[in-house]
Amino acid sequence: MFSFFAIQESWEVIKQHKNRNLLTGFGVAWGIFILLLLVGTGSGLQKGIMVIFQDYSQNSIWIYGGKTSLAKPGQHAGREIRFTDKDLNLFKKRFDEIRYISPEIQYPGKQVNSKLQSYHRFKCYGVKSDYFKIKTFKIQKGRLLNPIDNQKHKKVAVIGHKIAEGLWGDNYPLGQYICIDGTWLQVIGVLSQNSLFSNNPNHIYIPIETLKDQFGLENNLNCFSMALYSNASPEIFEKKIKNFLARKYNFNSEDKNALYIENMQVRSKTFNNLFRWINFFLWIVGISILSSGIVGVSNIMLIIVKERTVEIGIRKSIGASPWSIRLMILHESILITFLAGLVGIICSTGTIWIVNALINAFSNNDNAIFKGLDINFNIALTALLLLTISGTLAGLYPARKASSMLPVKALNSINN
Protein backbone atom coordinates (compact mmCIF):
# COMPACT_ATOMS: atom_id res chain seq x y z
CA MET A 1 0.00 0.00 0.00
CA PHE A 2 2.75 2.43 1.00
CA SER A 3 5.83 3.16 -1.11
CA PHE A 4 8.57 5.76 -0.97
CA PHE A 5 7.35 7.35 -4.21
CA ALA A 6 3.76 7.62 -2.92
CA ILE A 7 4.90 9.20 0.33
CA GLN A 8 7.21 11.62 -1.51
CA GLU A 9 4.39 12.63 -3.84
CA SER A 10 2.02 13.20 -0.91
CA TRP A 11 4.66 15.25 0.89
CA GLU A 12 5.15 17.51 -2.14
CA VAL A 13 1.40 18.08 -2.37
CA ILE A 14 1.20 18.90 1.36
CA LYS A 15 4.03 21.44 1.07
CA GLN A 16 2.11 23.34 -1.61
CA HIS A 17 -0.48 24.39 1.01
CA LYS A 18 1.62 24.75 4.18
CA ASN A 19 -0.60 27.11 6.13
CA ARG A 20 -3.78 25.19 5.48
CA ASN A 21 -2.22 21.85 6.37
CA LEU A 22 -0.53 23.29 9.48
CA LEU A 23 -3.87 24.55 10.80
CA THR A 24 -5.49 21.23 9.94
CA GLY A 25 -2.74 19.24 11.62
CA PHE A 26 -2.92 21.43 14.74
CA GLY A 27 -6.30 19.91 15.66
CA VAL A 28 -4.84 16.39 15.50
CA ALA A 29 -1.65 17.39 17.37
CA TRP A 30 -3.70 19.08 20.09
CA GLY A 31 -5.98 16.04 20.43
CA ILE A 32 -3.04 13.62 20.89
CA PHE A 33 -1.32 16.11 23.23
CA ILE A 34 -4.38 16.35 25.50
CA LEU A 35 -5.03 12.59 25.31
CA LEU A 36 -1.52 11.67 26.50
CA LEU A 37 -1.55 14.32 29.23
CA LEU A 38 -4.90 13.09 30.56
CA VAL A 39 -3.90 9.43 30.50
CA GLY A 40 -0.47 10.23 31.97
CA THR A 41 -2.07 12.18 34.82
CA GLY A 42 -4.53 9.37 35.57
CA SER A 43 -1.79 6.73 35.53
CA GLY A 44 0.52 8.84 37.72
CA LEU A 45 -2.24 9.48 40.24
CA GLN A 46 -3.11 5.77 40.34
CA LYS A 47 0.50 4.84 41.14
CA GLY A 48 0.57 7.47 43.88
CA ILE A 49 -2.69 6.29 45.45
CA MET A 50 -1.61 2.64 45.40
CA VAL A 51 1.38 3.61 47.58
CA ILE A 52 -1.14 3.57 50.44
CA PHE A 53 -1.08 -0.22 50.34
CA GLN A 54 2.68 -0.67 50.38
CA ASP A 55 2.67 -0.76 54.19
CA TYR A 56 0.63 -3.96 54.04
CA SER A 57 1.03 -7.42 52.64
CA GLN A 58 -1.46 -7.63 49.76
CA ASN A 59 -3.04 -10.81 51.14
CA SER A 60 -3.41 -9.49 54.69
CA ILE A 61 -6.62 -9.30 56.72
CA TRP A 62 -7.20 -7.21 59.84
CA ILE A 63 -10.02 -8.10 62.22
CA TYR A 64 -11.32 -5.68 64.86
CA GLY A 65 -13.75 -6.65 67.58
CA GLY A 66 -16.82 -4.45 67.97
CA LYS A 67 -20.17 -4.54 69.76
CA THR A 68 -23.08 -6.71 68.77
CA SER A 69 -26.14 -4.85 67.52
CA LEU A 70 -28.39 -7.87 66.88
CA ALA A 71 -29.70 -10.04 69.71
CA LYS A 72 -29.66 -13.83 69.63
CA PRO A 73 -31.53 -16.32 71.80
CA GLY A 74 -29.84 -16.12 75.19
CA GLN A 75 -27.58 -13.26 74.09
CA HIS A 76 -28.41 -9.58 74.30
CA ALA A 77 -27.18 -6.89 71.90
CA GLY A 78 -24.33 -4.62 72.99
CA ARG A 79 -21.80 -7.34 73.94
CA GLU A 80 -18.15 -6.56 73.18
CA ILE A 81 -16.27 -9.05 71.02
CA ARG A 82 -12.74 -9.63 72.31
CA PHE A 83 -10.06 -12.19 71.45
CA THR A 84 -7.25 -13.90 73.38
CA ASP A 85 -3.84 -15.34 72.49
CA LYS A 86 -5.32 -18.82 72.78
CA ASP A 87 -7.93 -17.88 70.19
CA LEU A 88 -5.21 -16.77 67.80
CA ASN A 89 -3.32 -20.04 68.22
CA LEU A 90 -6.57 -21.91 67.57
CA PHE A 91 -7.20 -19.90 64.39
CA LYS A 92 -3.76 -20.69 62.99
CA LYS A 93 -4.18 -24.43 63.68
CA ARG A 94 -7.70 -24.53 62.26
CA PHE A 95 -7.14 -22.55 59.06
CA ASP A 96 -4.39 -23.76 56.74
CA GLU A 97 -4.60 -20.50 54.78
CA ILE A 98 -3.01 -18.48 57.63
CA ARG A 99 0.74 -17.99 57.22
CA TYR A 100 1.35 -15.31 59.87
CA ILE A 101 -0.85 -14.04 62.68
CA SER A 102 -0.25 -11.38 65.31
CA PRO A 103 -2.29 -9.53 67.91
CA GLU A 104 -2.16 -5.76 68.24
CA ILE A 105 -2.78 -3.99 71.54
CA GLN A 106 -2.61 -0.20 71.69
CA TYR A 107 -1.40 1.41 74.91
CA PRO A 108 -2.63 5.00 75.33
CA GLY A 109 0.56 6.45 76.80
CA LYS A 110 0.70 10.20 77.33
CA GLN A 111 4.39 10.92 76.97
CA VAL A 112 7.63 9.25 75.95
CA ASN A 113 10.92 10.52 77.35
CA SER A 114 14.62 10.08 76.82
CA LYS A 115 17.06 11.27 79.46
CA LEU A 116 16.97 14.82 78.09
CA GLN A 117 13.89 15.23 75.87
CA SER A 118 10.19 14.35 75.79
CA TYR A 119 7.82 13.57 72.91
CA HIS A 120 4.02 13.71 73.07
CA ARG A 121 2.63 12.76 69.63
CA PHE A 122 3.00 8.99 69.62
CA LYS A 123 1.13 5.69 69.74
CA CYS A 124 2.45 2.58 71.44
CA TYR A 125 1.55 -0.94 70.25
CA GLY A 126 2.23 -4.38 71.65
CA VAL A 127 2.78 -6.92 68.86
CA LYS A 128 4.51 -10.18 68.00
CA SER A 129 7.34 -10.60 65.50
CA ASP A 130 4.93 -11.90 62.81
CA TYR A 131 3.37 -8.43 62.79
CA PHE A 132 6.28 -7.13 60.72
CA LYS A 133 5.65 -9.77 58.06
CA ILE A 134 2.04 -8.65 57.79
CA LYS A 135 2.83 -4.94 57.83
CA THR A 136 5.84 -4.55 55.58
CA PHE A 137 7.69 -1.75 57.34
CA LYS A 138 11.08 -0.57 56.17
CA ILE A 139 13.78 -0.44 58.81
CA GLN A 140 16.03 2.62 58.80
CA LYS A 141 18.41 1.54 61.55
CA GLY A 142 18.81 -1.56 63.71
CA ARG A 143 16.33 -4.46 63.61
CA LEU A 144 12.69 -5.39 64.13
CA LEU A 145 11.22 -7.45 66.97
CA ASN A 146 11.92 -11.19 66.91
CA PRO A 147 10.26 -14.19 68.66
CA ILE A 148 12.87 -14.21 71.47
CA ASP A 149 11.93 -10.65 72.45
CA ASN A 150 8.42 -11.90 73.25
CA GLN A 151 9.48 -15.20 74.80
CA LYS A 152 11.84 -13.45 77.24
CA HIS A 153 9.59 -10.41 77.76
CA LYS A 154 12.44 -8.11 76.78
CA LYS A 155 12.17 -4.39 77.45
CA VAL A 156 12.96 -3.30 73.92
CA ALA A 157 11.27 -1.04 71.39
CA VAL A 158 11.19 -0.24 67.69
CA ILE A 159 10.37 3.42 67.15
CA GLY A 160 9.42 5.69 64.24
CA HIS A 161 12.04 8.04 62.83
CA LYS A 162 10.12 11.17 63.93
CA ILE A 163 10.32 10.04 67.54
CA ALA A 164 14.04 9.33 67.14
CA GLU A 165 14.58 12.82 65.69
CA GLY A 166 12.48 14.44 68.41
CA LEU A 167 14.36 12.74 71.27
CA TRP A 168 17.95 12.64 69.99
CA GLY A 169 18.13 14.85 66.91
CA ASP A 170 21.06 13.80 64.73
CA ASN A 171 22.56 11.57 67.44
CA TYR A 172 22.58 7.79 67.05
CA PRO A 173 19.39 6.39 68.68
CA LEU A 174 20.19 2.66 68.79
CA GLY A 175 21.01 1.43 72.29
CA GLN A 176 19.43 4.54 73.86
CA TYR A 177 16.55 4.27 76.32
CA ILE A 178 13.03 5.68 76.24
CA CYS A 179 10.64 5.90 79.18
CA ILE A 180 6.89 5.35 78.79
CA ASP A 181 4.93 5.96 82.01
CA GLY A 182 7.84 4.87 84.21
CA THR A 183 8.98 1.89 82.12
CA TRP A 184 12.40 2.16 80.44
CA LEU A 185 12.83 0.41 77.09
CA GLN A 186 15.94 0.06 74.95
CA VAL A 187 15.69 1.20 71.31
CA ILE A 188 16.70 -1.64 68.96
CA GLY A 189 15.32 -0.29 65.69
CA VAL A 190 14.15 2.86 63.90
CA LEU A 191 11.51 2.70 61.15
CA SER A 192 11.56 4.72 57.96
CA GLN A 193 8.36 6.19 56.54
CA ASN A 194 6.81 4.00 53.83
CA SER A 195 4.21 6.37 52.47
CA LEU A 196 2.47 9.70 52.97
CA PHE A 197 -0.40 7.91 54.74
CA SER A 198 1.81 5.87 57.05
CA ASN A 199 1.70 6.84 60.72
CA ASN A 200 4.68 4.72 61.71
CA PRO A 201 7.04 7.77 62.11
CA ASN A 202 5.15 8.42 65.40
CA HIS A 203 4.64 4.80 66.43
CA ILE A 204 6.39 2.67 69.03
CA TYR A 205 6.30 -1.14 68.84
CA ILE A 206 7.21 -3.33 71.80
CA PRO A 207 6.79 -7.07 72.54
CA ILE A 208 3.17 -7.74 73.48
CA GLU A 209 4.19 -9.77 76.55
CA THR A 210 6.30 -6.84 77.77
CA LEU A 211 3.34 -4.52 77.26
CA LYS A 212 1.10 -6.78 79.38
CA ASP A 213 3.71 -7.12 82.13
CA GLN A 214 4.71 -3.49 82.44
CA PHE A 215 1.37 -1.77 81.95
CA GLY A 216 -0.99 -4.31 83.51
CA LEU A 217 -3.13 -4.78 80.42
CA GLU A 218 -5.64 -7.61 80.26
CA ASN A 219 -5.26 -10.50 77.86
CA ASN A 220 -8.32 -9.41 75.86
CA LEU A 221 -7.42 -8.31 72.35
CA ASN A 222 -9.38 -5.83 70.29
CA CYS A 223 -7.51 -6.47 67.07
CA PHE A 224 -5.42 -9.07 65.30
CA SER A 225 -3.99 -9.37 61.82
CA MET A 226 -3.17 -12.22 59.47
CA ALA A 227 -1.21 -12.76 56.27
CA LEU A 228 -2.44 -15.61 54.09
CA TYR A 229 -0.48 -17.91 51.82
CA SER A 230 -0.29 -16.71 48.20
CA ASN A 231 -2.57 -19.52 46.94
CA ALA A 232 -5.38 -18.58 49.35
CA SER A 233 -8.26 -16.33 48.32
CA PRO A 234 -8.68 -13.48 50.87
CA GLU A 235 -12.30 -12.95 49.82
CA ILE A 236 -13.28 -16.59 50.39
CA PHE A 237 -11.27 -16.75 53.62
CA GLU A 238 -12.93 -13.58 54.95
CA LYS A 239 -16.37 -15.21 54.70
CA LYS A 240 -15.09 -18.43 56.21
CA ILE A 241 -13.49 -16.87 59.28
CA LYS A 242 -16.42 -14.50 59.85
CA ASN A 243 -18.84 -17.43 60.00
CA PHE A 244 -16.44 -19.28 62.31
CA LEU A 245 -16.11 -16.30 64.67
CA ALA A 246 -19.90 -15.83 64.66
CA ARG A 247 -20.33 -19.42 65.89
CA LYS A 248 -17.48 -19.23 68.41
CA TYR A 249 -18.51 -15.92 69.98
CA ASN A 250 -22.23 -16.55 69.50
CA PHE A 251 -23.28 -13.52 67.48
CA ASN A 252 -25.30 -13.17 64.31
CA SER A 253 -23.12 -13.56 61.23
CA GLU A 254 -25.15 -10.76 59.57
CA ASP A 255 -24.32 -8.35 62.41
CA LYS A 256 -22.12 -5.71 60.77
CA ASN A 257 -21.20 -4.08 64.10
CA ALA A 258 -19.88 -7.20 65.80
CA LEU A 259 -16.71 -7.30 63.69
CA TYR A 260 -14.89 -4.98 61.37
CA ILE A 261 -12.81 -6.83 58.78
CA GLU A 262 -10.31 -4.97 56.65
CA ASN A 263 -9.28 -7.04 53.64
CA MET A 264 -6.33 -5.31 51.96
CA GLN A 265 -6.60 -7.23 48.70
CA VAL A 266 -10.29 -6.39 48.33
CA ARG A 267 -9.59 -2.73 49.11
CA SER A 268 -6.71 -2.69 46.60
CA LYS A 269 -8.98 -4.21 43.94
CA THR A 270 -11.62 -1.57 44.66
CA PHE A 271 -9.13 1.24 44.03
CA ASN A 272 -7.82 -0.47 40.90
CA ASN A 273 -11.36 -0.83 39.53
CA LEU A 274 -12.06 2.81 40.33
CA PHE A 275 -9.00 3.95 38.40
CA ARG A 276 -9.87 1.63 35.54
CA TRP A 277 -13.10 3.58 35.08
CA ILE A 278 -11.32 6.91 35.57
CA ASN A 279 -8.74 6.01 32.91
CA PHE A 280 -11.53 4.83 30.61
CA PHE A 281 -13.27 8.19 31.04
CA LEU A 282 -10.00 10.06 30.36
CA TRP A 283 -9.46 8.03 27.19
CA ILE A 284 -13.00 8.88 26.03
CA VAL A 285 -12.42 12.61 26.68
CA GLY A 286 -9.06 12.53 24.88
CA ILE A 287 -10.39 10.58 21.90
CA SER A 288 -13.36 12.98 21.66
CA ILE A 289 -10.96 15.93 21.41
CA LEU A 290 -8.87 14.00 18.87
CA SER A 291 -12.00 13.27 16.86
CA SER A 292 -12.62 16.98 16.28
CA GLY A 293 -9.17 17.19 14.68
CA ILE A 294 -9.92 14.15 12.53
CA VAL A 295 -13.13 15.77 11.27
CA GLY A 296 -11.03 18.77 10.27
CA VAL A 297 -8.67 16.53 8.30
CA SER A 298 -11.63 14.89 6.55
CA ASN A 299 -13.06 18.28 5.57
CA ILE A 300 -9.72 19.43 4.18
CA MET A 301 -9.37 16.23 2.18
CA LEU A 302 -12.77 16.90 0.60
CA ILE A 303 -11.52 20.34 -0.41
CA ILE A 304 -8.33 18.80 -1.79
CA VAL A 305 -10.35 16.32 -3.85
CA LYS A 306 -12.42 19.18 -5.27
CA GLU A 307 -9.28 21.19 -6.09
CA ARG A 308 -7.64 18.21 -7.79
CA THR A 309 -10.70 17.14 -9.80
CA VAL A 310 -8.98 17.83 -13.11
CA GLU A 311 -5.82 16.01 -12.04
CA ILE A 312 -7.89 13.01 -11.00
CA GLY A 313 -9.69 13.10 -14.36
CA ILE A 314 -6.38 13.14 -16.25
CA ARG A 315 -4.98 10.29 -14.15
CA LYS A 316 -8.05 8.14 -14.80
CA SER A 317 -8.13 8.99 -18.50
CA ILE A 318 -4.59 7.68 -18.99
CA GLY A 319 -5.33 4.41 -17.19
CA ALA A 320 -5.14 5.05 -13.42
CA SER A 321 -7.34 2.60 -11.53
CA PRO A 322 -9.95 3.70 -8.95
CA TRP A 323 -7.87 1.90 -6.30
CA SER A 324 -4.73 3.96 -7.11
CA ILE A 325 -6.75 7.19 -6.88
CA ARG A 326 -8.15 6.05 -3.56
CA LEU A 327 -4.65 5.28 -2.26
CA MET A 328 -3.38 8.67 -3.37
CA ILE A 329 -5.94 10.47 -1.21
CA LEU A 330 -5.48 8.07 1.69
CA HIS A 331 -1.70 8.59 1.59
CA GLU A 332 -2.13 12.34 2.00
CA SER A 333 -4.71 11.96 4.76
CA ILE A 334 -2.62 9.47 6.75
CA LEU A 335 0.58 11.49 6.27
CA ILE A 336 -1.03 14.73 7.52
CA THR A 337 -2.56 12.94 10.49
CA PHE A 338 0.56 10.94 11.32
CA LEU A 339 2.95 13.91 11.18
CA ALA A 340 0.61 16.11 13.22
CA GLY A 341 0.10 13.34 15.76
CA LEU A 342 3.83 12.71 15.99
CA VAL A 343 4.33 16.39 16.83
CA GLY A 344 1.62 16.01 19.51
CA ILE A 345 3.35 12.96 20.99
CA ILE A 346 6.74 14.73 21.08
CA CYS A 347 5.24 17.84 22.67
CA SER A 348 3.28 15.85 25.28
CA THR A 349 6.34 13.73 26.14
CA GLY A 350 8.42 16.87 26.54
CA THR A 351 5.73 18.51 28.67
CA ILE A 352 5.46 15.44 30.90
CA TRP A 353 9.25 15.35 31.30
CA ILE A 354 9.34 19.06 32.28
CA VAL A 355 6.41 18.67 34.73
CA ASN A 356 8.02 15.62 36.37
CA ALA A 357 11.36 17.43 36.61
CA LEU A 358 9.68 20.41 38.32
CA ILE A 359 7.80 18.13 40.73
CA ASN A 360 11.03 16.30 41.64
CA ALA A 361 12.88 19.60 42.03
CA PHE A 362 10.35 21.31 44.30
CA SER A 363 8.88 18.34 46.18
CA ASN A 364 10.79 17.44 49.35
CA ASN A 365 8.54 14.52 50.24
CA ASP A 366 9.69 11.21 48.74
CA ASN A 367 6.38 9.66 49.80
CA ALA A 368 4.10 12.24 48.17
CA ILE A 369 0.85 10.88 46.79
CA PHE A 370 1.50 12.38 43.34
CA LYS A 371 5.04 12.04 42.04
CA GLY A 372 4.32 13.11 38.49
CA LEU A 373 2.69 12.16 35.23
CA ASP A 374 3.28 8.74 33.76
CA ILE A 375 3.79 7.74 30.14
CA ASN A 376 5.04 4.45 28.80
CA PHE A 377 5.75 2.66 25.54
CA ASN A 378 2.32 1.01 25.42
CA ILE A 379 0.51 4.34 25.62
CA ALA A 380 2.71 5.87 22.90
CA LEU A 381 2.21 2.78 20.71
CA THR A 382 -1.55 2.98 21.20
CA ALA A 383 -1.45 6.67 20.26
CA LEU A 384 0.44 5.88 17.04
CA LEU A 385 -2.09 3.17 16.22
CA LEU A 386 -4.89 5.66 16.81
CA LEU A 387 -3.18 8.08 14.44
CA THR A 388 -2.98 5.53 11.65
CA ILE A 389 -6.61 4.51 12.09
CA SER A 390 -7.70 8.14 12.36
CA GLY A 391 -5.85 9.13 9.19
CA THR A 392 -7.42 6.25 7.32
CA LEU A 393 -10.91 7.12 8.52
CA ALA A 394 -10.41 10.81 7.76
CA GLY A 395 -9.46 10.08 4.16
CA LEU A 396 -11.83 7.20 3.51
CA TYR A 397 -14.87 9.19 2.32
CA PRO A 398 -12.89 11.73 0.26
CA ALA A 399 -10.89 8.84 -1.29
CA ARG A 400 -14.08 6.97 -2.26
CA LYS A 401 -15.51 10.16 -3.73
CA ALA A 402 -12.35 10.76 -5.79
CA SER A 403 -12.14 7.18 -7.04
CA SER A 404 -15.78 7.20 -8.17
CA MET A 405 -15.36 10.26 -10.44
CA LEU A 406 -15.96 9.76 -14.14
CA PRO A 407 -12.99 11.04 -16.21
CA VAL A 408 -15.25 12.97 -18.64
CA LYS A 409 -17.04 14.87 -15.86
CA ALA A 410 -13.76 15.53 -14.07
CA LEU A 411 -12.18 16.99 -17.21
CA ASN A 412 -15.29 19.01 -18.02
CA SER A 413 -14.92 20.79 -14.65
CA ILE A 414 -12.18 22.87 -16.33
CA ASN A 415 -14.89 24.89 -18.06
CA ASN A 416 -17.03 25.28 -14.90
Image (cartoon, rainbow, N blue to C red):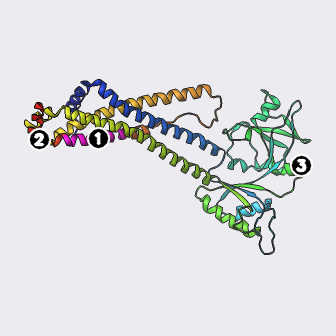
Residue 378 visible (yes or no)? no
Front-most of residues 23 and 251:
23
Most distant residue in the bottom direction = 73
The residue that disc 3 covers is 215
In the rendered image, the quadrant that contains the C terminus is: top left
Q: How many marks?
A: 3
In the rendered view, would you say 18 is above or below 201? above
Task: Point out residue 131 in the picture as x, y percentages from the top left corner.
Answer: 72, 49
Q: Is residue 399 magenta?
A: yes
On the image, which quarter does residue 386 sit in?
A: top left
Circle 1: element type? helix
Front-most of residues 373 and 202:
373
Marks 2 and 1, how far apart at CA: 23 Å
Question: Which portion, as a residue range, is magenta?
Answer: 384-401
Task: Point out residue 28 in the picture as x, y percentages from the top left corner.
Answer: 37, 34
The residue that disc 2 covers is 406
Query: Comparing marks 2 and 3, which lies closer to the viewer?
Result: 2
Marks 2 and 3, how far apart at CA: 98 Å
**In terms of sequence position, does the residue under pointer 2 or pointer 1 come before the other?**
1
At label 1, the amino acid type is Thr
Marks 1 and 3, how far apart at CA: 76 Å
Q: What secondary structure prevails in the magenta region?
A: helix
Circle 2: element type? loop
Most distant residue in the right direction = 182
Query: Comparing marks 1 and 3, which lies closer to the viewer?
Result: 1
Q: Which mark is residue 392?
A: 1
